[in-house]
């Protein structure tokens, strides 16, 4: 089959992955700050939680978008899925991001279990992002002429 080049799709994926890493870093920084202010009972701006929430929505949206790009690009190039470990790791990233967002909505007041689970999911998400970044680099090298 004579298909068009998918290089434009990989450029979008590269930028989206970069934005995902920026969003994750922003989430980590705002999360650490919220944790610090809660422990020390230091006042924080009311908009701080909104920024953290907005970055979380951004990260989940980017993760789902990257999954869609990966599926479309892989199906368009190979005709099937399952050509590398990158796909399952990408699914893990999306699952962790969505689960973390869901758990974040359960954090109210002193719900320490939800807060602890949210933090643990985000630590796993950080590791998964690093894995998907590394495997993605390997996958993209296959597509470059």
Image (cartoon, rainbow, N blue to C red):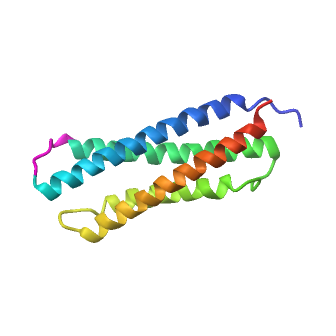
Q: Who's the residue at 66% across and 52% down the image?
A: 86
Q: Who's the residue at 51% across and 36% down the image?
A: 18
Q: Residue 38 appears at what percent x and percent y?
A: 16, 56
Q: Residue 15 appears at what percent x and percent y?
A: 55, 32
- Stretch in magenta: 42-47
Q: Residue 69 appears at what percent x and percent y?
A: 63, 41
Q: Which residue of the protein is positioned furthest toward the right in this rendering?
A: 1
Is 6 situated left or right of 117 in this image?
right
Q: Along the line of sight, which residue is nearer the eye, 46 or 79?
A: 46
Most common SS among magenta residues: loop
Residue 85 vs 19, above or below: the answer is below
Query: Any magenta on residue 22?
Result: no
Q: Residue 114 appears at what percent x and percent y?
A: 30, 67
- Location of the C terminus by quadrant is top right
Q: Who's the residue at 28% across and 50% down the image?
A: 32
Q: Who's the residue at 18% across and 67% down the image?
A: 110
Is 112 situated left or right of 75 in this image?
left
- Location of the N terminus by quadrant is top right
Q: Along the line of sight, which residue is nearer the eye, 134 or 50?
A: 134
């Amino acid at each position: 089959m004579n298909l068009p080049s998918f290089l434009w799709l990989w450029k979008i994926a590269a930028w989206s992955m970069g934005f995902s890493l920026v969003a994750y870093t922003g989430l980590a920084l705002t999360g650490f700050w919220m944790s610090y202010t809660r422990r020390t009972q230091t006042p924080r701006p009311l908009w701080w939680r909104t920024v953290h929430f907005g970055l979380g929505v951004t990260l989940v949206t980017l993760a789902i978008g990257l999954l869609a790009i990966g599926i479309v690009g892989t199906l368009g190039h190979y005709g099937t899925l399952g050509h590398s470990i990158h796909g399952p790791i990408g699914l893990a990233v999306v699952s962790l991001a969505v689960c973390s967002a869901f758990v974040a909505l359960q954090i109210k007041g002193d719900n320490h279990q939800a807060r602890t689970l949210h933090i643990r999911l985000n630590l796993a998400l950080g590791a998964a992002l690093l894995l998907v970044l590394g495997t993605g680099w390997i996958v993209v090298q296959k597509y470059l002429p």
